[in-house]
Image (spheres, rainbow, N blue to C red):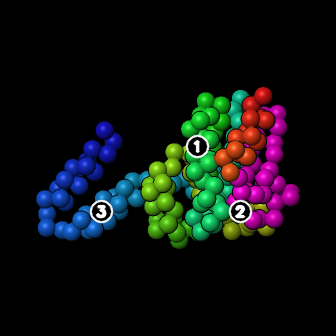
Amino acid sequence: MKYAWIIGLVLFFSCKDATEKEQVAEVKQILETEISLEVYDFDGLQKFLSTTDDKTYVVNFWATWCAPCIKELPYFEKLNKNYSEDVEVILVSLDFPSKYETKLKPYIINKNLKSKVVALNDVDSNTWIPKVDESWTGAIPATIIYNKNKRQFYEKSFNYDELETEVKQFLK
């Protein structure tokens, strides 16, 4: 089991005189260093925006500091779970690089995100935002749904029913 050694550490620390809070902090720190986060500039991210295989892709731009983004993330996770055969969900974090370790990785772990999460680290947003979509103002959340035949951009928040309705149009 991949995390068997972590369980061993938890048991080891539980035998010590450390408080439960310290134990949790130690294990959490170990887990956070174990999560690998793919970080791309816009050129590297483009492969997620233009795949031409038979899947439908849902690419959501979000950040941990964006309340509407956080509110809708469970809907993307549910979509990922319910349509995993035909749909790939990619969550593109726009969090600041200085927050990857303290905010982004803990959020991914605490929410047990199963969708693919990547980080975009490209400060030249005035260049790459219109390349994502000419109509995008840069506000988040923003989502692209596409497949080899169709592409649609949404600069809005979704509830699950809205998101599922949009995705189903790509699966026909």
Looking at the image, is 54 positioned above or below residue 116? above
Most foreground residue, 22 or 117: 22
From the image, which quarter does the C terminus lie in? top right
Nearer to us: label 2 or label 1 = 1
Looking at the image, is 116 positioned above or below residue 168? below
The label number, if any, that marks residue 78 in the structure image: 1
Q: How many marks?
A: 3
Under tag 2, what secondary structure?
loop
Q: Which residues are magenta?
A: 130-158
Amino acid at pointer 2: Ile
Nearer to us: label 1 or label 3 = 1
- Would you name the residue on which mark 3 appears? 24
Question: Could you tell me if residue 52 is visible in this image?
Answer: no
Label 1: how many residues lie within 10 Å, few (<14), some (14-19) or many (20+)?
some
Residue 57 point in image, percent of width and height: 69, 40
Under tag 3, what secondary structure?
helix
Amino acid at pointer 1: Lys
State the residue at coordinates (23%, 55%): 10
The label number, if any, that marks residue 140 in the structure image: 2
Where residue 1 sits, quadrant-wise, is: top left
State the residue at coordinates (59%, 69%): 65
Q: Give whichever of discs 1 and 3 has the lower sequence position.
A: 3
Residue 41 point in image, percent of width and height: 65, 58
Amino acid at pointer 3: Val
